[in-house]
Amino acid sequence: MRIHFSGDMEELHEGITLLEEILQISSHSSGFPIEVKQRQGPIELGCDETKGYIFYDKKTHFFRALGKWLEAFQTEESFHLVETPQFEKNGAMIDASRNAVPTVEGVKMLLRRMAVMGLNVLMVYTEDTFSVKDFPYFGYMRGKYTQQELCAMDDVAFCLGIEMVPCIQTLAHLTEALKWNYAEELRDTEDILLVGSEKTYQFLDALIESASSPFRTNRIHIGMDEAHQLGRGNYLEHNPYTDTFSIMKEHVNQVTEITDKYGLEPMYWSDMYFKLGSKEQNYYDLNSVVPKEIASEIPNQASLVYWDYYHSDKDFYRQFIKKHQDLKRGLIFAGGVWTWNGIAPNYGKTFSTTEAALSACKEAGVKEVFATFWGDNGAETPTFSGLLGLQLYAEHGYQQEVDEEVLRKRFAFCTGGNMDDFLLLSQFDETPGVGENNLETSQPSKFMLWQDPLLGLFDENIKGLPMAKHYTTLYEKLKQVQQATLWQPIFTYYTQLANVLSTKSELGIKIKQAYEEKNITKIHHAIDDMTQLKREVDTLRTFHREMWFWTNKAFGWEVLDIRYGGVIVRLESSIHRLKQWLDGEVETLEELHEERLYHDAPFSMPDRQLGGNKYHRIVTASPFSG
């Protein structure tokens, strides 16, 4: 569609050009006229058959309004729409530290979709995946971003009205950064920096300068979460025993001096304060009390980020938001799109927690929210499979309550995706034996894909559940999906995953039963299944590889190659062992002779939960390293 824009257009031309392809528009003097006016207040847009208009406040509001205008114009010649932004800032944090490092083009693709949704903040979480001068081993072979790459992302974001905020770690979560010998004098424990050391703060100065300089914003996320063993390692060799509050206070003040030096406004996760104020050492303890003397030491220029993607009770969020507000510092809320718990997104948990959390945020007057897209344990789930969750955040950003049908239509317009198709992906873990909407965050698809066919560490957990039937049904549903070409790599992969799991899910149970029954025919059938399954798993690997390289750098894929290779080789060894037994070369197969126990570690699993999201605990009961 040709459009002739007029009015307050100076800051919008470059952004419109970036969105022309996905919106299927072009600017032309002979196009349909749309008057554009920038002014304070809600978004207002409409059309009276001969001309259109868009009134907006911030740049990001214009791009959302343009999308809304085009969507309405498809079906109506005359319309008038008003939207009131519910938050000043609303966006996403994507993980670039758990193997998958999004390419610059992948980030640009996300930025364009975010702009049409009306989101205005993006953080790329980089523990060690950015370049730091004089520290060549920092992020070595991890796909770290160059300064030029970060600048390129920020340039596109700026044109679209999106603030890109650098996001790093300055205390814990630094295992990969601290594993090299250069960091020997920087370590407290294997993942925590040595507080109080002059070399630590020289190192952090370099990190903060390198991370912030490519971006226009003066804000920076400096992490500091989950430092559970703070002061319990090498710190004790240099200092007397010191309470964790005092160590945390010292470190925050030192890091804030560095951010002040560069004119930056820091934000960091709040969990350490509340966990240390809890008698049970529990972050989400409603009885946690942060002592006044500690609260008063939190730097005035800092904002605390309350992260919570676990609760489905709005009242819990109300109470915990109030606890944060009582600290009298800036407050930002971080929820989550559950892309990190297994091999497929969990939309049941995403929707339940998001509805409760964002409703509470609106009631409490929280001004900034964002959705995290973590990639724990290998980044097996692609970020873009969670797009529907991001759309949910966007709609909450402009409505008091989100109507499902409106969400469905907006998702189709903003992404070209079908909401029902994306929701299908949740069924990989919403299996028999799992509670409604998978609120307990089970991961059966992950452990059934990776677990060993002869050891079957999770077989007792799923015994008696019709898993094969479930995945066969899901496979048939996914084969019918006619998804937009852009998202086809995602659905090609997941269709094949359902195909693989329709055979592999109950394979170990069938093999052990046949062995115990001495049923030679069933053993031969199992060998045939495994022979075919090797080919199907390799096809799955190639589809996953295509999906990975579509939006990610090469580094990190080797981890998943090794995992798929492990499945294929163990299938081969399992065939070999069964043939040895059939041929009388061995009298007993020790692997199948062993009694199967319920897998209960590292966490006990209550009813309606099928856990297992750590690869090294899925594939073997033996030490995986060390």
Image: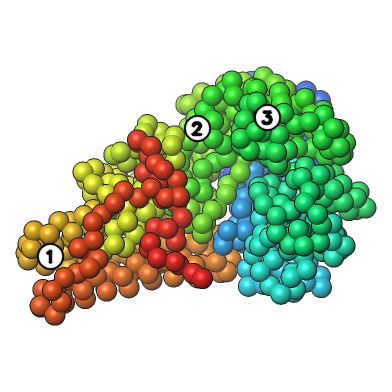
Query: Is residue 24 among the parts visible in the rendering?
Result: yes
Q: Quadrant of residue 589?
A: bottom left
Residue at 70% of width from left, 38% of height from top? Answer: 276
Identify the amino acid type marked 1.
Answer: Ile
- Residue 121 rendering spot, x and y as whole percentages: 71, 42
Looking at the image, which is closer to me, 458 or 486? 458
State the residue position of label 2: 351
Image-quadrant location for residue 268: top right
Question: Looking at the image, which residue is at 57% across and 40% down?
Answer: 336
SS class of the residue under badge 3? Answer: loop
| Identity, as a three-letter code, of the amino acid under mark 2 | Phe
Q: CA distance from mark 1 to mark 3?
A: 57 Å
Amino acid under disc 3:
Ser
Which mark is in front, 1 or 2?
Answer: 1
Using a 10 Å C-alpha cutoff, classify the residue at mark 2 as few (fewer than 14 neighbours), some (14 to 19) or many (20 or more). many
Left or right of 134 in this view: 613 = left
Q: Mark 1 and mark 2 in contact? Answer it, CB < 8 Å.
A: no
Closer to the chain start, of discs 3 and 2, is 3
Residue sitting at the far front: 240
Alpha carbon of mark 1 to alpha carbon of mark 2: how far?
Answer: 44 Å
Question: Is residue 367 depicted above or below 588 in this figure?
Answer: above
Foreground label between 1 and 3:
3
SS state under label 1: helix
Q: Is residue 136 left or right of residue 179?
A: right
Q: Label for residue 288?
A: 3
Say which quadrant the N terminus sits in. top right
Residue 83 in the figure: left or right of residue 503: right
Which residue occupies the foreground of this view, 189 or 344? 189
- Binning the other alpha carbons within 10 Å of mark 1 as few (below 14), some (14 to 19) or many (20 upward) gives many
User: In this orientation, which residue lies closer to the viewer: 463 or 548?
Assistant: 463
